[in-house]
Image (cartoon, rainbow, N blue to C red):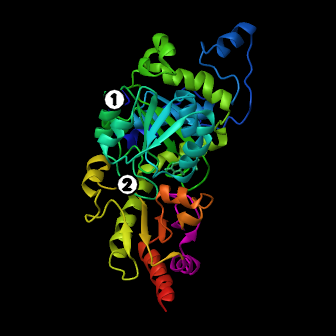
């Protein structure tokens, strides 16, 4: 039966293992070891040359990880999925695969802190230029693309700015110039967002967030829809002559990822595989609570501004509904008077946890400017666009009344 006949909810639970388990285990076991043994030198050769599909060494591939990757492929519709050690490993491996000295990346400066730092500092030192522009202005984006552009990169909802780019328009602009669209889709899982439909060619996910099933582990995913013609890529055009649409996955899997070595641990693949089974449920429940809390926050006098794309008053409301359906997820932001009001508020919370991360089962608060962006210079902070009176809340699975009353009591104390 085709994997597309069931809903993703069913598919994730019925997905068979890539290879039959010796004991018929219903959960994919953790193959924790480093290496796999062969009967003959010929079998070893075949495995090392990728001709038999057998595992050789866990840095390169592993049965537990393979089962997890195939489940993600079934849920997302991606042609190729690779799990790696973190969300940042996903993003850095993608750019190690497609960028090269002299090439450039067209993107927004409004990005998750480490992605901003990867582009601004790390890749720059390898001769890759980053062209920051207003990703909401498609004409500006298109005008910044040239023959040396290796990708247009965007977050589907920027964290923590909550800006939403028009992905179809963005991918059309990129494709007109023969450039792929790479998107960080961490904030909306596949049950609510079909990246392929909006022209995303390569998807990066921090599976630490929704997928891990409650902050159990750090992980990342690279999804390839095989929609881009890599003969247009400066870096991959030679390889594309023999591998066609598989040029990206070939370069990534058989060279870059194994050389970078940011391998996901099999134990982590097991945990995240388990997280997939409850992803839809947790996402649905957290998102519903988030809308309720965001709506309530708009009525609280001390709160200057509430950022949530699911509020009808939000400027991205219509676009967000078109792209992400009924909910933009469980991350919201709000602003207080100033930094010191934010600190006092944070310090007085009892139920909400003072921690970074998103989509834990617990509600988490952070002051992004002093933490995630804390080591940036004042001018880079300005470019990153994160003001010092902004708080980010990731709504968990607690009773919303308890979260509201915690916010209420902490604000009351700030006021008095
Ligand atoms: C957390 C996050 C990352 C980085 O993921 P890690 O798993 O922490 O490496 C990248 N992008 C976004 C949008 C994130 O929220």
Identify the residue shown where x is 39% and y is 65%: 290
Identify the residue shown where x is 56% and y is 28%: 100
Mark 2 closeness class: few <14, some 14–19, many ≥20 residues within 10 Å: many
Q: Nearer the viewer, residue 251 or 121?
A: 121
Q: Quadrant of the N terminus?
A: top left
Identify the residue shown where x is 49% and y is 33%: 104
x, y percent for residue 58: 69, 30
- Whichever of labels 1 and 2 marks the residue nearer the N terminus, that label is 2
x, y percent for residue 121: 60, 44
| Picture quadrant of residue 61 | top right
Range of residues picked out in magenta: 340-366
Q: Nearer the viewer, residue 412 or 415?
A: 415
x, y percent for residue 33: 74, 33
Q: Is residue 137 magenta?
A: no
The reply to whether residue 19 is visible in this rendering is: no
Q: Secondary structure at mark 2?
A: loop
Name the disc covering residue 163, or none: 2
Name the disc covering residue 175, or none: 1
> Is 323 above or below relative to 227?
below
């Amino acid at each position: 039966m085709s994997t597309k006949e069931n809903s993703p909810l069913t598919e994730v639970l019925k997905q068979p293992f890539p290879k039959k388990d010796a004991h018929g285990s219903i959960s994919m076991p953790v193959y924790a070891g480093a290496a796999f043994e062969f009967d003959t030198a010929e079998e070893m050769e075949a495995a090392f040359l990728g001709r038999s599909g057998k595992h050789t060494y866990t840095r390169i591939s592993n049965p537990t990880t393979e089962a997890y990757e195939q489940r993600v492929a079934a849920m997302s519709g991606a042609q190729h999925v690779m799990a790696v050690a973190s969300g940042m490993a996903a993003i850095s491996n993608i750019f190690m695969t497609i960028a090269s000295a002299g090439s450039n990346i067209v993107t927004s400066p409004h990005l998750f802190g480490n992605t901003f730092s990867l582009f601004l500092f790390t890749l720059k030192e390898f001769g890759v230029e980053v062209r920051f522009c207003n990703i909401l202005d498609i004409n500006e984006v298109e005008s910044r693309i040239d023959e040396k552009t290796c990708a247009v990169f965007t977050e589907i909802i920027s964290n923590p700015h909550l800006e939403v780019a028009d992905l179809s328009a963005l991918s059309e602009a990129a494709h007109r110039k023969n450039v792929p669209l790479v998107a960080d889709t961490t904030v909306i899982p596949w049950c609510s967002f079909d990246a392929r439909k909006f022209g995303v060619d390569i998807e990066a996910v921090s599976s630490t967030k929704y997928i891990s099933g409650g902050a159990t582990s750090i992980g990342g995913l690279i999804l390839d829809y095989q929609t881009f013609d890599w003969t247009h890529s400066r870096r991959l055009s030679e390889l594309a002559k023999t591998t066609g649409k598989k040029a990206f996955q070939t370069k990534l899997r058989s060279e870059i990822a194994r050389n970078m070595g940011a391998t996901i641990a099999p134990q982590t693949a097991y945990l995240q595989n388990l997280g997939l089974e409850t992803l839809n449920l947790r996402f649905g429940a957290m998102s519903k609570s988030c809308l309720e809390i965001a709506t309530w926050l708009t009525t609280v006098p001390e709160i200057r501004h509430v950022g949530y794309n699911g509020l009808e008053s939000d400027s991205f409301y219509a676009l967000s509904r078109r792209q992400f359906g009924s909910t933009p997820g469980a991350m919201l932001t709000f602003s207080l008077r100033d930094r010191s009001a934010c600190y006092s508020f944070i310090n007085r919370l009892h139920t909400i946890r003072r921690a970074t991360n998103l989509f834990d089962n617990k509600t988490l608060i952070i002051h992004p400017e002093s933490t995630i962006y804390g080591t940036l210079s004042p001018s880079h902070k300005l470019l990153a666009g994160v003001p010092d009176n902004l708080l980010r809340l990731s709504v968990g699975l607690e009773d919303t009344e308890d979260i509201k009353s915690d916010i209420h009591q902490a604000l009351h104390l700030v006021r008095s």
